[in-house]
Structure formats: structure tokens, C-alpha cells
Amino acid sequence: MRKGVLGIVPARLASTRLPKKPLYPILGRPLIEWVWRRVERMSSLDHAVVATDSNEVADVCRALGAPVVMTSAAHPSGTDRVGEVAAREEYRGFHIVANIQGDEPLLEEHHLSAAIALVRDEGWEVGTCATPLVDDEARKDPSVVKVARAENGRALYFSRAQIPYKRDDKPTHDEMGREPFLRHIGIYAYTQGALSAWVALPPSPLERLERLEQLRPLEAGVRIGVAVVGSADAGVDTPADVARLEEHLIAMGHAQPFVTHG
């Protein structure tokens, strides 16, 4: 019998812009703790684990009570790390695998459930999410990944560039608040078969060029569905993102330590 949805949080220490990103302190606690505390409460998942190649990250996660799987340090992307875990005997029975980025501490469950629904209910091989760009600075920022999709929701391309490009003028504020100007939210849901096919592919030319792992399956013809959801907080990539996140968390009343159990 199928076991439902397995959530995997890939967490690696290597980061060019934020040293030891999973362990980077956010209001005094490591980033991975904020992510895990959110993930462990998500009813969309039947089970969740952290996948890492770092003993430091593993020790922090185990102290939180998070199940940890040690993985190879050679993976070129988070999905490759997720694929290693999903292929383990104890996890092969899960019908859907969800990849929850280790730098998305404010991920909303309805975003994840929208990606899962694309696979479970609508038959897409891979599901992911996007939200209106809204901000012109984000449109220009190469650290903000943009996505263009067809009318049926199929992903056409992901890029760090300004896609789609409005030839005659920059988009108005109203235009930026709706399609086709979308920011990609880096969560994925896959069938086990699609995940296996993805990680069996070598890194592709476009993936290497843009440093976007989702271009690998897209180039190979894998169908990726994109759900457009409401507003979404950005992930954490830079010290400026950390400052923004801390301000947001304080405003949400999260300045005090989490209550731990056990």
C-alpha cells in the first residue's frame, strides 16, 4: 500500500553568499531549525526527514528530534540529494516526494499542498509554485528566479533574467501583480518515477548556465506544472535576506525561542 507523501529537506553547508547557510543564526537559532519547526507541523506530509552531508547539520537536527539521512557530498543539486534519500528501501513506498528547501523558513503549507495537488490530483510529473513578482527590483534581481508558464500551467522556462520581457516598456505595477510576471517558489513535488528520471539525467547545459536545477528535467521533456499561489516570502540567500527575515519574524512574535519537547 502506498504511504502518501514524503517530505525531504535538503541541507548542505556549501553556500557562496551565506557561509554555512543551514547553521546561520536567525534570531540566535540556526536557519535549519526555523525550517524544520515549520515542516514538522505540516499535515500535507505523512513523514519528513532532513537530508544532509554535514555532521554539524545532522547534530543540530537530531537535537531537534528531526529524522536525518546522511547523503553523498557529491550531489550537484538539492533534487539529487532528495533522490538519494527517496531511493532508500524504507522510503520507496511513498507515492509522492516533496522537496522542501532548507532556506525557506516562512514557507506556507498551502504552497506545498498546491504543488502536491498538481501531482496527486492533476497528473503532472512534477509540481511547483509561483507567485506574482509585484516588485520591480525583484524583476531585475538575478537571485530571484522567474518562471514563464503556458495557459494550462505547464512550465515553459525558468530564468534569473527578466522573463517574460516587455519589449516596449517596463511592466506597470498592476501588471507585475499578476501573470505572466511570476516569481518561482523553490519547492517541488514529484512522483517517484519522475524523481528517479530527473536524478538519472546529467546536469544539462542550461542548468549549468543559469545554475537552476529545474532546467535539467525541463530540457529533457519532463512536464512540470506550476501552481500560482498568493503572496509568498522569499528564501534566505544573503545577509540582507537575513536582516529582512529577522524583522519579519519579530513582527510575527517569534523573537522568543521555540518551546522544545522531550
Image (spheres, rainbow, N blue to C red):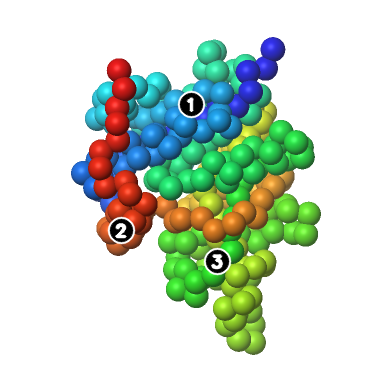
| Residues at discs 2 and 1 in contact (Cβ within 8 Å) | no
Which residue is depicted at the point 47% across and 68% down? 138
Q: Callout 3, which amino acid? A: Leu
Which residue is depicted at the point 77% across and 40% down? 122
Please tell me which of labels 3 and 2 falls first in the chain.
Answer: 3
| Residue picked out by circle 2 | 247
Q: Badge 2: few (under 14), some or many (20 or more) residues near its Cα, within 10 Å?
A: some
Residue 254, x across and y down, in percent = 32, 46
Q: Callout 1, which amino acid? A: Ala
Which residue is depicted at the point 62% across and 54% down? 229
Q: Callout 2, which amino acid? A: Glu
Residue 182, x across and y down, in percent = 60, 63
> Mark 3 or mark 2: which is in front?
2
**What SS does tag 2 mark?**
helix
Residue 10, x across and y down, in percent = 43, 35
Picture disc at residue 48 = 1
| Residue picked out by circle 3 | 133
Please tell me which of labels 2 and 1 falls first in the chain.
Answer: 1
**What SS does tag 1 mark?**
strand
